């Protein structure tokens, strides 16, 4: 098996998660049932997921010198993530996210402030070039400045490293970014915003994926929650069903679990459909647990789940 070496660039935020019977309206207070503080941030979650799945992970990010930053450093030490390019700043605090989880459905609403992570610079990325060029995959998201995202993708592409853009949180992108994306992995909401067309089912997901391909993306995977994912390339159109690993507890972090798994599978040489199925298995396990980074499964758990389905 090839060494699944990955470079992930993204933000760390401390997740302050609240469980409640419903979302409050503006000006309303709702009594919650539970509160948790834990490591989060899309890039950080994806790095943790990839590391737990057997990936050799280098993370590029920026932290403040504060308790949330210490939480991040402890997390990366425990997960054996290379932090040579996790820079520190005194000018900005480490980011935070307020996560409200519906007790009944496990669905969530999130407000995120990337904080220090939003100040990753091109100079920071240049320092990581040697790590990027040795990677089988480079992956990033949109909790960074768009300039940093574009520059990171451009550097990886220039070094011949396959790139993944998880375009989350949802944001309209300039057309010039798409040719730097060998793989782009929006969910339904993100895909609809990117293409400015609604995504309500597989057929509409396929239409939107075609638009993203026409803009220069190499391959598109639209994740569809409980409906799995739609894979679209120049030669392949295929729906990959979701994988049920048990009762849903919380969907926060499911997209990060998918992307971490998808990236590791690609780094190991799997084709896009097989990598998507692997990502669905990782996400399927993650939603049976509380939290984001803390919900990411180990490789043995994913392999056992896939074996049980074969």
Image: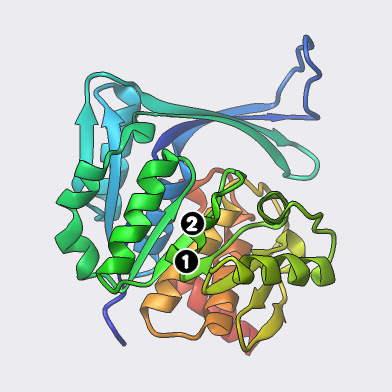
Residue 176: give its label.
2
From this view, report whether residue 65 is shown above or below residue 147.
above
Task: Locate the N terminus and report the quarter of the image it occupies.
Answer: bottom left
Please state which of residues 274 and 293 is positioned toward the viewer in this rendering: 274
In terms of image quadrants, where is residue 307? bottom right
SS at badge 2: helix
From this view, report whether residue 139 is shown above or below residue 69.
below
Residue 44 in the image: x percent, y percent? Answer: 39, 47
**Cβ atoms under marks 2 and 1 closer than 8 Å:** yes
10 Å crowding of disc 2: few (<14), some (14-19), many (20+): few
SS at badge 1: helix
- Left or right of 279 on screen, residue 88: left
- Seen at 20% across and 43% down, the residue is 123
Please state which of residues 254 and 234 is positioned toward the viewer in this rendering: 234
Residue on which disc 1 sits: 179
10 Å crowding of disc 1: few (<14), some (14-19), many (20+): some
């Amino acid at each position: 098996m090839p060494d699944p070496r990955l470079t992930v660039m993204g933000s760390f935020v401390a997740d302050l998660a609240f469980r409640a019977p419903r979302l409050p309206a503006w000006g309303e207070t709702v009594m919650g049932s539970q509160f948790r503080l834990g490591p989060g941030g899309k890039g950080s979650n994806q790095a943790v997921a990839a590391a737990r799945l057997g990936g050799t992970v280098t993370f590029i990010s920026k932290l403040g010198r504060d308790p949330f930053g210490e939480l991040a450093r402890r997390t990366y030490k425990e997960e054996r993530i290379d932090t040579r390019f996790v820079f520190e700043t005194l000018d900005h605090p480490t980011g935070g996210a307020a996560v409200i989880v519906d007790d009944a459905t496990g669905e969530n609403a999130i407000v995120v402030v990337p904080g220090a992570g939003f100040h990753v610079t091109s100079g920071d990325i240049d320092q990581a070039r040697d790590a990027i060029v040795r990677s089988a995959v480079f992956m990033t998201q949109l909790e960074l400045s768009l300039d940093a995202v574009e520059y990171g993708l451009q550097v990886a592409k220039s070094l011949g490293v396959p790139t993944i853009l998880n375009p989350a949180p949802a944001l309209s992108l300039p057309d010039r970014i798409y040719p730097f994306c060998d793989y782009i992995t929006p969910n339904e909401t993100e895909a609809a915003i990117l293409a400015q067309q609604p995504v309500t089912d597989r057929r509409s997901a396929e239409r939107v994926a075609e638009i993203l391909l026409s803009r220069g993306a190499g391959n598109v995977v639209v994740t569809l929650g409980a409906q799995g994912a739609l894979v679209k390339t120049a030669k392949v159109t295929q729906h990959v069903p979701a994988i049920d690993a048990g009762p849903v507890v919380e969907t926060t972090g499911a997209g990060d679990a998918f992307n971490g798994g998808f990236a590791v599978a690609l780094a190991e040489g799997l084709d896009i459909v097989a990598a998507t199925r692997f990502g669905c298995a990782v996400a399927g396990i993650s939603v049976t647990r509380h939290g984001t980074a803390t919900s990411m499964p180990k490789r043995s758990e994913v392999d056992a789940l896939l074996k049980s389905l074969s």
